[in-house]
Amino acid sequence: MPRVEIENIINKEINRINLHLPKARKTLSQLLSEEEPKIQLRDGSYHYFKKNELKLLSTLIEEWEIMSLRLPIVLEITSVWHGYFRVRGKIEVKVIEKILNQYDILEEKTEVILPRYLLPKIRKTLPTTTTYAFIME
C-alpha cells in the first residue's frame, strides 16, 4: 500500500477517535454565565460541565484570564512521545500546573509536556473541564 494511502487511513481513524472533541470551545466566563453549561461535540452530541468544577477553575486564575480560558482544556496524546502528553496555551498550562502543584509564577509557559502517570490526578480533579485529543505528528 502506498505511504500516502496509509497516512490517509490513519488520519481518518484519528478523526473518528476524536469525535468526542468540541466543535468549538467556550470561555470559562461564558460557561459560568450559562444555566446549563455545555458545548456541542463533533459527533453532534453535547458535553455538560459541572458548575463546581467551573468555579474551582475561576479560583485558580486571575479574573481577566476567566475571559480567555477556553474549555475543555485539551490533553494531547501524541504518537511521538510515548509515556507523555502535552498541554498548550498559557492559561491552560497554568491551570494544569496548579492542579499538579508545579506552578512557578516566574515561569510563563505556553506549552508543557508531562508524563502520562499524571493524567489520573488531572482527570480526577477536572473530569468535565479536560478532554483527550489523539494527534499524529
Image: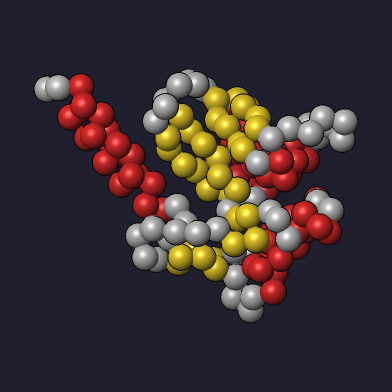
Determine which quarter of the picture holds residue 36. bottom right
Question: Is residue 131 shown to the viewer in this render?
Answer: yes
In terms of depth relative to the viewer, which is nearer, 133 or 100?
133
Q: Say whether residue 104 is left or right of residue 91.
A: right
* Image coords of residue 59 (percent x, y): 82, 56
Which residue is depicted at the point 14% across and 22% down?
A: 2
Which residue is depicted at the point 63% across and 64% down?
A: 50
Task: Tell me the quarter of the image containing the N terminus.
Answer: top left
Rendered position, 101 above or below 48: above
Rendered position, 36 above or below 64: below
**Residue placed furthest toward the left:** 1
Task: Tell me the quarter of the image containing the C terminus.
Answer: top left
* Image coords of residue 116 (percent x, y): 56, 29
**Residue placed furthest toward the right:** 106
In terms of depth relative to the viewer, which is nearer, 120 or 132?
132
Determine which quarter of the picture holds residue 35. bottom right
Determine which quarter of the picture holds residue 135. top left
Which residue is depicted at the point 55% across and 25% down?
A: 84
Q: Say whether residue 60 is left or right of residue 74.
A: right
* Image coords of residue 5 (percent x, y): 17, 29
* Image coords of residue 37 (percent x, y): 60, 70
